[in-house]
Amino acid sequence: MNETYSISDEKIQKLTDIAKNYSETISNTTEEIKKIIVGQDDVIKKIIISIIADGHVLLESVPGLAKTLMIKTMADIFSVNNVRIQFTPDLLPADILGTKIYKNNSETFEIQKGPIFHNFVLADEINRAPPKVQSALLESMQEKQVSIHGETFQLEKPFLVLATQNPIENEGTYKLPEAQIDRFALKILIDYPTKDQEIEIIEKNTSNLQIKVNPIVELKQILEIQKFNEKIYADTIILKYVASLIDATRNPKKYELDLENIIEYGASPRASIWLIKAAKANAMINGRGYVIPDDIKQVAHEVLRHRLILTFEAEAEEVNSDKVIDIILEKIPSP
């Protein structure tokens, strides 16, 4: 493409200088997390991207891959509070949001806030809770506020929900509706560690060695980083590229893609927004004040994989969302 950026080099340099400072802080944070968490470098990076972009995460993995430890470690390093909520079929919305309780001493009703009033919330096995509970959580995620018996309370920033679901077990679960899944900025897949990583995990967890992490980022600084992320420059040519990628999921024939029998419903406009927000965060991590096509490609799978609804034919041919995204990224020329 012969199009050029429509912003001065001076402005881009100024943004890049600020991004480099934040990039160093983020790099130190990542190294600190790696003291505890072994072999999940890409997962750590993508969760940090979601924190920077101020979006929520859907984690898909089998049990035992250190999700709880990961969020606790991140909360310690980011100097924020955290909570783990185990979702079960008998859970009620009030168990998450809070309720009013009667105090005998004062003979009045008082608000008792639920566990949702934490900065980092691990919603473990979200698909085990009934739809009413899922809806209550997802509404809080969207509005960043909670209503308890007619009173509205703002949730403290930063507010991040990491919801997990087990891809293997379907018995006794309530599938998340597509419209609600769309509210998650990213969907991250956690895989098993390699053999060498497994050895390192065993060594760390079967010795007397006490590894402690140090707080690297203060709460105030997280909010500053999130605010700066909005200022990262994404040129019109990048916006056009993203629009083409999303349009290709809806109208594959227009782009000579043989996916009409594979994709039932394409990505929503929310996908375009999160592609740009996540790409900006990726640019910042790399010490740039502007987005390049590679930033889009690096976050495309996490942003899009839960937003594409595939046909039964795709399932029969064992074609998943990631494969479709690969085909689209390969076909649509980047600027």
Image (tube, helix red, strand yellow):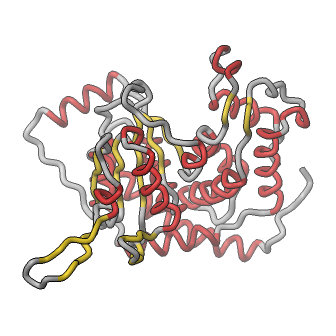
Residue 33: x and y, percent? 33, 50
> Which residue sits at x=50%, y=41%?
176
| Occupied quadrant, residue 126 | top left
Residue 279: x and y, percent? 63, 54
Q: Is residue 32 visible?
A: no
Q: How many numbered tags mark residues here?
A: 0
Instruction: From the viewer's side, name the closer residue of 327 and 101.
Output: 101
Residue 251: x and y, percent? 85, 38
Instruction: From the viewer's side, name the closer residue of 326 and 38.
Output: 326
> Which residue sits at x=35%, y=65%?
119
> Which residue sits at x=67%, y=21%?
312
> Which residue sits at x=82%, y=64%?
5
Instruction: From the viewer's side, name the closer residue of 279 and 117.
Output: 117
Toward the top, the furthest residue is: 316
Is 195 drawn above or below residue 18 in the view shown? above
Q: Is residue 161 visible?
A: yes
Toward the bottom, the furthest residue is: 106
Is 22 drawn above or below residue 121 in the view shown? below
Question: 137 left or right of 264?
Answer: left
Residue 18: x and y, percent? 56, 72
